[in-house]
Structures are given as C-alpha cells and as structure tokens.
Image (spheres, helix red, strand yellow):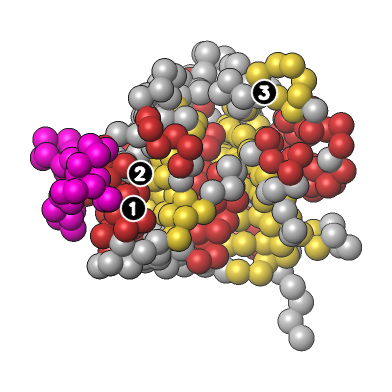
Amino acid sequence: MNQPITLSTYLHNWAGKYEINQQVEATINALAEGSMQIADLASTGGALATDTGNTDQGGDYQKILDQQAHEILLNACQQTSVAVVGSEEAPEVINLDASASLVVVMDPLDGSANIKTNAPTGTIFSLYPLSEGTYGKSDAAALLKGTEQLAAAYVIYGTQTALALTLGEGTHLFILDRQSRSYVLTRENIQVPKVAKEYSVNASNQDFWHDSIQNYVDDCITGYADHKQKFNMRWVASLVAEAHRIFARGGVFLYPSDSREGDEPGRLRLVYEANAMAFLMEQAGGAATDCSRRIMDIQPEHLHQKTPLVMGSEANVEQVTRYQNFEEEGHYRQGKAPLFGSRGLFISGRGNY
C-alpha cells in the first residue's frame, strides 16, 4: 500500500533546490500549522463566537476567534521569509522584515458569523513576491494583480478540515489527519465540471441587484437559463464553503455589486479573498470574474478594495458575463416590472443571452 503524501512532502518535492520555492514551502507549512490551531479553537465554539465590539475592515463585527486567527497566522508569518502581511483584520499592511522575499495577504477567518450555528468557516491566503521598492511604502507591496500570485490556498473548518492549494500547477486538496497532525493529499488536479445546474447567491439582497443579475437568477429559477433545466440554489454565507462545494460538484457562485450604499463596488475583497479564489478556480479549470472582467487581471488600488465576484464552472460564469454584457450594451430587458416578470401577464423574450 502506498504511503499517503503529506502536504509537507508534496511541498518539499515541488520546491527542489530553488530558494524562492523553498521560502514558499516554509511559509505554506507554517500557515498550514497555524490553520490546525485555528481548527482546534473553532471546534470549541463557546466564548470564541462572542463579538468583540469592534468591526473589521469590511464593517462586520469581529468575533474573538477572528482576532485570534489573525494573531496565529501573523505569528506563523513572522517565523518565515515574509516581509509584509496584509490582513482583513488590520487597517494597513504589517511590515515584518525588509530583507525577506514574500508578501502574504489573508482573510484569517472567513464566515466567522457561522460559528454560532456550527456552519463552515475558513481561512484564505495568497503568497506574492515582494516587489522592489515597495517595502514600507503604505500598502504598495500588497497591491499586485492576481496573476502575480506564487501560491493560493484556503482551509475549510467543517466536518473535515481541508486545505485546497495551488502553486500554479493545478489545484490539489489535502485533508487534515488529526492523529498525525498533518494534511494528507486526497485529490490531485481537481477539475471543476464545465457546467452544472447549481447556483449560489444571497437572495436576501435581491431587491438591490442590477437587472443583469436579477434576470440571470430569474432564468435559473424558471429554467430559461439553460434549455429549461431548472437550477438548485445554495447559500452558506462563507466564501470558502461555497468554493469547496464547487470543487466537489461544480456550479456558480455570485456576489454581485448592488445599489446599497457601500456595496456599489461589491462586497468581497479583491486582494485577500477574490484573487486567491480566482487562482484556485482557474487552476481547476473554472473561471472567476467581476461579472465582466477576469478577476486576476484587475489592478488593486488599495488593500481593502471591494469587488463583485462570480466564480465556478466555466460555462456558467461565461453565461453570467453574457447577461452583464447584454445590459451594458443597452438592450431592453424588462427587469422586475410586474407585468413582465416570470409570473407576469407578459413574459419577455428569454434565452437570448
């Protein structure tokens, strides 16, 4: 029987004798070890789910575990070749070591509102090279396009603790073996189905969506979006959990911009959430856009920049883009008008996207 391949073994074999790869290896190993500590804490729940009274950079109330996860991963970065850290839990980048080579951006605890309900939470992180002349200059070191990522990963804390990783050579899944305290490779070169009849969106925001998203979701519900095949809807309120489901069975996740004050540019963070997910998704044969542009081609302007995000099966993501383009080109499509809705007296032409 073949010996299981652990994350540390996988990284060691990948790194070889290349110094930058060895630094990436050490940093991912340290962050993975930190994620095990977070998994242990998350499993205790209780007081760690209590609000601190403070809010993070997205305006969400911080839990005690949010802050602890941040400190655990920051400490992991301090033990390796990390020059700069950008975190959802810090207003600006944290400068650690001007002589180091790497930048880490992270969401230490995604979906922390799920702790009280025992629903999945997660950790998201990306590694970038430190660009010359950016250390100590505001957030400049973290403001790189997603195409510059050296590695990206998420950890999901659920019935299993699992780590999905890409080093630019496919996306691979590791499951935490709690007895050996090591992540073990269980799925190599994940491939997201090209199309699937499942979508994920927070329908409570429906009244604020732009017409393109409203029309797409309406058509998924009625079956018009794909040859009269009705879609199933899912929503977990954790970006990590949504991605994990897509890697398991395909589909599309949408968190669009909307008309609410503060959410016009979207709600998710480009630098430390969307880019990592886009890298993982593309390396698994999926796609990720802001409804029209490839996520990893967007130049960040500040650390906590928001973006819309559509990710998942390539054909599904492309279909959302077609709906968006249709609206931007000025084509008339009755949105929520009661006489022209899917249950109105006059049903508008469908299937033209």
Circle 1 residue? 317
The number of discs equals 3
Mark 1 or mark 3: which is in front?
3
Distance CA(mark 1)–CA(mark 3): 31 Å
Circle 3 residue? 61
SS at mark 2 in the image? strand
Q: At 47% across and 50% down in the image, what residue appears? A: 200
Expressed as whole percent of the image width and height from the top left, the position of residue 197 reads: 40, 64
Q: At 35% across and 49% down in the image, what residue appears? A: 217
Distance CA(mark 2)–CA(mark 1): 7 Å
Mark 2 or mark 1: which is in front?
1
Q: Is residue 198 left or right of residue 315?
A: right
Q: Is residue 19 left or right of residue 42?
A: left
Q: At 87% across and 31% down in the image, what residue appears? A: 47
Q: At 35% across and 44% down in the image, what residue appears? A: 289
Circle 2 residue? 289
Main SS class of the magenta portion in the image: loop
The residue type indicated by label 1 comes to Val
Q: Nearer the viewer, residue 96 or 64?
A: 64
